[in-house]
Image (cartoon, rainbow, N blue to C red):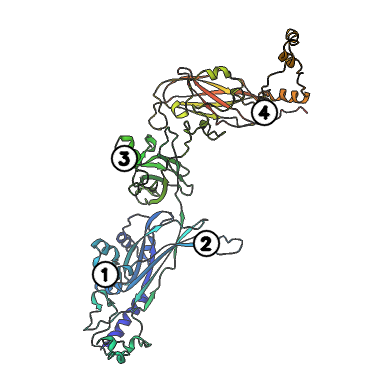
Amino acid sequence: MADREDEDSSNIDSEFIEASQLTYAVPLSSSPDLAEVLKQSSSKSSTSSPFNSLEQRAFLFFDESIHVYLILRTPRRDEEYLRPLLARISLSLEAYVVNSNALGRDHSPPASEVIFSDDAVERSLEAGKVDNATESEQSDNLPVILHDDTDGEDKERYSFAIWKVPVLISRPRIRLQSPTVVFAAAAHLRAPVTPDENSGDVDDSDGGIVRNGYLESRAPVGLNLLEPFAHDPALHGFKPRLSAQRVSLVVPVTQSKDFRRPIRGLQNLSFDVVAAVHTRVKFARPNAQPASSTVIAMLELDFTPYFECETVLTNISLSLPSGVVTDMNSDAGLKLPLSCVAHDHVTFLYRLAPTEHEQLLEGAPVAVTVPGTPRASMAPAARDLDISIEVKALVRPGECTPRLKMAWSTPVDFTPPVNPGFGASSMAPPLQRAHRPSQLSIDGAASMVNPAVARPDSLPGLEAATQRNVETTIPDFGITITFSGPEKPARVGEEFCWSVFVVNRSGTSALPISNAPPVSRKLALRVIPKRRRTNDVRVVRPPTRRQPPAAAAKGKKDPVAREQQLIADAVIDENVVHAMHRSSLVEGYDVLCLSADARVGPLAPGACHVVDLRFVALRAGTLTIEAVRVVDMVSQEHVDVRELPTIHVEPELTES
């Protein structure tokens, strides 16, 4: 009787496997109605699969979450017949990215990488998972069964079991060259397990699935290999036992319980995959005085040219543990949701500050660490910034709107700079650097260089007498200046221009780099040329003089005067005199400024102005300007701008 039941079960399995077929699809619609597709296909009386008419995606996006529908077609049966068979089906799905078929120089196959691998059904049938899962999770794991209700005697009717598997198209680590994502699914039917009447190891509701690996009840046991140790006094009456069946090799007479028989199906399914957007984040410190631990994050989104549909930037989220993130995108054109197309480049600014810095600005008490005490209570200077971006692609609005989500973490260091880029230095003597940045040379300390050497056009006596320093730094000055040089190289003796773009940033709350009040500015620009010197040290010696005749006559009576009369004039070499004469002179200008008086203003807060500075180069080569002095005509404050364009001058054209 048992043999007949086993034979009937084997025949049912063979019939089910031979008549079943597995296909899978990625529909174009985000929420397809498969029952309606089956109904429309049945009305057309087509002999092909009814889901072949389902429109699929033409291409996919990286960072997109899609649903792959695994469709198992089998002859028409009722659900009571199909449920035990479907419970024994094992489905697996794998997705991998493959580059184009262009072979390399070494004729190696195209690179590929697996981005998704999951057992779609087996994971829900593990011990304890089905019992502890919620109703929604159980419904997602169970297949949807649809029946073909075609009225026709000649046409064979089928039943369809459909699984919906979510797949994330993640970005691989290989270098992409015309990538394609390939899906491969496989289905197997596990062998049935006959439940024993006295064994609780098998659950009938799951189609004979073994729940544990214990021995069956009332089964004969093998010989005890540890029987000689039963009377060992060292074991204190404990009788060990080891069955011979545990260590001897037993050849199975029947097939294994985990024996699986494959179900024929589609070999693979491939789609083109593209990246819709590339992201990167940069960090910079604001040029503020005094220096703070605040960091400005610049989030750049670059939309690629590989798609033609419109995309909508729906959400950008930045979270910082033990820190404050301030959105600086107050412009109406950067409000989310933001519509973008291919080739767009969008930059968002965010202000990042640690919590202790914000408490200090608000006047709240901040814990102070005493030297020698542990710093366990203080937050670390380097923290992780969590960034999340959500984009919706309108491939076909209302029908196909895939959603892309990118999330990653990047470290941010809030350690205050040791030597800030702007502001006076507290070191004595102050730190001096030639060109990087220029504002480090502006300080209130006395210079160690002779003013006649550093600034030959100034008055050393007047500068030494005055004690008031009216120089100020760029952040306190409240202006932004941009210098633009000519596109073509200049020539000796020909005039060229610089375009100076000046913006009055005083009172601007969008950028926290200016502390100046919102006032109108009236400025003057003066160019300080650069002149070379061969020697910065001038040797000053008292000249030797001969005594006058009256002193010489007196020296005949005075012994001291007589001794001085005997000193002759110093003998000086002509070469030394010539070298001293050349070293005391300053060479002429390399670049001559023709704009002696360039005025800007009155310039209202937030206004801008463009002024041209005209120059003439006197020699060929790579030339520079020492500085451009910006003077406030009202407050008489001034600042020297030294970060200026380099001038490339070519020799004048010779007439042939």
- Quarter holding the C terminus? top right
Q: Which residue is mark 1?
A: 128
Tell me: 336 left or right of 304.
left
- From what the image shows, is residue 378 above or below residue 225? above
Q: Which residue is mark 4?
A: 535
Question: Which comes before the other along the chain, label 3 or label 2?
Answer: 2
Tell me: 252 left or right of 530.
left
Residue 297 falls in image quadrant:
top left
Q: Which residue is mark 3?
A: 366
* Circle 3 crowding by C-alpha within 10 Å: few under 14, some 14–19, many from 20: few
Front of the two marks 2 and 4 = 4
* Distance between mark 3 and mark 2 Cα atoms: 55 Å
Front of the two marks 3 and 2 = 3
* Distance between mark 2 and mark 1 Cα atoms: 40 Å
Q: Residue furthest left?
A: 198
Is disc 4 placed on a helix, strand or loop?
loop
Q: Which residue is mark 2?
A: 111
Question: Which comes before the other along the chain, label 1 or label 4?
Answer: 1
* Distance between mark 2 and mark 4 Cα atoms: 65 Å
Q: Is residue 145 visible?
A: no
